[in-house]
Each structure stands twice: as C-alpha cells, then as structure tokens.
Image (cartoon, rainbow, N blue to C red):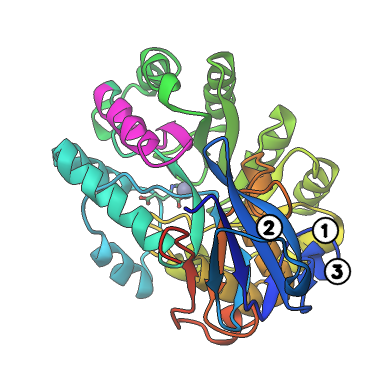
Amino acid sequence: MSASTLVTGIGELVTGDGSGEAGLGVRHDDAALVLEEREGVPTVAWVGPAAAAPPADARVDVEGRAVVPGFVDSHSHLVFDGDRSGEFAARMTGTPYDGGGIATTMDATRAASDARLRDLVVGRVAEMRAQGTTTVEIKSGYGLDVEQEVRAVRLAAEVTDEVTFLGAHVVPPSMRDDREAYLDLVTGEMLTACAPYARWVDVFCEPHSPHAFTEEESRRVLLAGREAGLELRVHGNQLGHGPGVQLAVELGAASVDHCTYLCDADVEALAGASATTVATLLPGVEFSTRSPYPDAGTLLDAGVSIALATDCNPGTCATSSMPFVIALAVREMGLSPAQALAAATVGGAKALRRTDVGTLTVGSRADLTVIDAPSYTHLAYRPGVPLARALNLSSG
Ligand SMILES: N=CN[C@@H](CCC(=O)O)C(=O)O
Ligand SMILES: [Zn+2]
C-alpha cells in the first residue's frame, strides 16, 4: 500500500459508526476515505466528503459502487480435507445430521500432508476474501489427537490471529469407550500443546449428539481452556434445546454459536448478557441441514447481541460466502438488510471481541469490501451474484 491512499467515487459508504438504522452509519454525501499505514497496519485515517479530502499519495476510484466494512466471519472450520457431499445429499432426502460425519473428515484430514492441508486452508481464505471477508476465525477439531490438533491450530495461525482450539469437537471413534480419557487429553496434554497457537477454546456442547459433549463435560473443557489463558466460545443449541446457551452466559463466553433452538429463558439470558456474550447465527447450517431458522428479529427486539457467520465446514455448511449468509438471514430469519449487514460486520467483531474491524471509522483497520452495486441492499436483493470483494489496496 502507498503511504496514503484516497478512496473516492463511493456511491454508498457504510461506516458502522453507530448512527442510523442498525448503527450502520450509511453516507450518501460523496464520502471518501483516506487510508494509511500505521505501525504496519493499513488504517482508516480520515472519513468525510470527497471535496474536503486531504491530499494523499495514491487514489482509488470505485466508480459509484458501495463500500462496506469487510465481513467478519467469526465461525469457521477451514482446516480439513475430504468431501461429504454424499452426507448432504442424504440429508436432503431425510437423513438427520447428528455429528457422526465428523469422524469421516477426521480420517481424511489426518491422511493429508502438511503441504496439502496448508494449500487447502490458504485457498479457502482466498475464496472468502474474494467474497468480501477480511477477518476470519478458524477452528481446529478434525485432528482429535495431540499431534493432529497441534498441526491444525499451527496451520490456522499462519493465516489468522483468530484461532480456536476445538479438540472437544467430538470424541474420536477410537476413544468412544473411554470418554473420560479423551476429556483428560483435551483438558491436559492436548490443550497445553495447542494453547500457544490459539486465542480461543470452543466445545460442541450438544446432548442430542452421542458424539459431542454434555453440559458438565463442556464446562470442564471451557474452564481448563480459561485456565490455560484462552477465551471462551461455545457450539450450543444446534440440534435441539439444551444447556449450551446458559453455559456460555454463565461462563462469560464471547459467543454461543448456532442458537437454532432457543427457549424463552435462553433469550432472556442472552439479552441480560448482551454486553459479554453474542449469539452467533449460522443460517447456512439451517439451509444445509434442513433445520428451522431461528428468529433473529425476535432476538434483536429482546436486546440480544447477534452476529452472522458461515460456519464453513465440510459437514453442516460448505459455503464460504458471507453474502449468501446475509441473504438467508434477510429472507429466512426476519432481519432487514441493514440488520443483517451489521451482524456480519460489527456483530462478528463483537463476537471476536475486536474493536478494530467491522467498522470504517477513523482508527479502524482499512478492511474495505466493495459491492459491485449502488447499495449493500443488493447483497440480499441479488442472492448468488458475486457482487462483493475485499479491496486489494496494493492494486486498487
Ligand atoms: N456442530 C459442530 N461442528 C460443525 C459441524 C462439523 C461437521 O459436521 O463436520 C458445526 O458447527 O456445524
Ligand atoms: Zn462450527
């Protein structure tokens, strides 16, 4: 990036400054941005009408397109090899999802060389960026032994700062007769080996899957992770009503993800914890598993903090597309286009406890996503059309 870059020709600028509908801070005043490198980080240095812009070393003209904060995809499982499209096809004709297919991906992932797995992860991050995602959280969870889980968090750490240790994804088949021994490993040797590469610990808390973890087991995993210096995230309430949401709130997790099945007490708990715990909704999963969509509009009305993410993984949702997720949230979950975009940007940032991404205000990272349309509304209005891309500042 040049020392400073002026971005002009913005038909609609979404700053996420907290004003207006859903706090999106939308500007239609021929707004411009000046971006500059601060301590090695491309940063928004100025926002205002183009006519008042300070001089800059370079200029990028986006020719009337909309510019929004880069999408923050706060939930993904990108470190995997293998294909489970057959499982998807079976689901479409009635076979329910129960987490059992995770072992299939574990086998394929363990068999992949480091070089192949790295190529797959790098390729998936590039695929996301090409669709407007500029921050991505990546979980382990398809290694399920010490060596393989360390490899997963190490490869994830090569491409993102938001790495999550998910050794407690499921109990691997070889240890199903001794869950206790697997829990000892996940909360002991595996955690110690993975923690240096990770910021977060996560657990698949799901009494409706025989492969996942109970409330008590999940609490143990999360508390051990916290003890090792990690912050908490939870997979909860995906396959039916359960304890995941309440556990996440009790322990002050940054996010509880899925929230497909919520009772009134869950909504109340999430609303009371809205400053701490985000409900991260993953509508691509409901799409790919034929599950009911949660009512995100009701959550917002109750005062719950929400985020939208892809959950990109080979089992329950193989899309890497935040625009697709936004379109689903608008069509199926009761969000307005503005609410959905806010959940995919500043909501995702909150779920990752980040204040430097998800907005385009002075001091934010210069993560710009350009929409090849006059307004962000086109993300939902023209689903499936490749309109969004992260702006590459080196080439404009
Ligand atoms: N539910 C747990 N984990 C993933 C699915 C993993 C898989 O089926 O491969 C999820 O978030 O949906
Ligand atoms: Zn997940």
Q: Residue at left 23%, top 58%?
A: 83
Residue 37 vertical position relative to residue 380 in the rendered view, above or below: above
Q: In this rendering, does residue 314 appear at all?
A: no
Q: Residue at x 67, y 63 (%)?
A: 33
Look at the image and say whether residue 170 sits in the magenta stretch. Answer: yes
- Residue denoted by label 2: 360
Q: Which residue is mark 1?
A: 18
Q: Which residue is mark 3?
A: 20
Q: Nearer the viewer, residue 50 or 378?
A: 50
Please name which of the two marks, 2 or 3, marks the residue nearer to the observer: 2
Callout in the foreground (2, 1): 2
User: At which x and y percent is residue 209?
Assistant: 45, 45
At numbered mark 3, what does the secondary structure look like: helix, strand or loop?
loop
Task: Report whether residue 55 is seen.
Answer: yes
Q: Position of residue 282 (x, y in %)?
A: 55, 59
Secondary structure under tag 2 reads loop
Residue type, label 2: Leu
User: Residue 39 or 307: which is nearer the viewer?
Assistant: 39
- In the rendered structure, are the residues bearing label 2 and label 1 in contact, judged by CB atoms less than 8 Å apart? no
Badge 2 or badge 1: first in the primary sequence: 1
Determine if the magenta segment contains residue 160.
yes
Point out residue 357 in the picture as x, y percentages from the top left corner.
Answer: 63, 49
Asked if residue 271 is positioned above or below residue 169 in the image, the reply reads: below
**Residue positioned 32% across, 46% down in the render:** 102
Q: Residue at x 59, y 25 (%)?
A: 219
Spatial distance from mark 2 to mark 3, Cα to Cα? 15 Å
Cα gap from disc 1 to disc 3, whole angstroms: 7 Å
What type is the residue that disc 1 sits on?
Answer: Gly
Q: Which residues are magenta?
A: 147-171
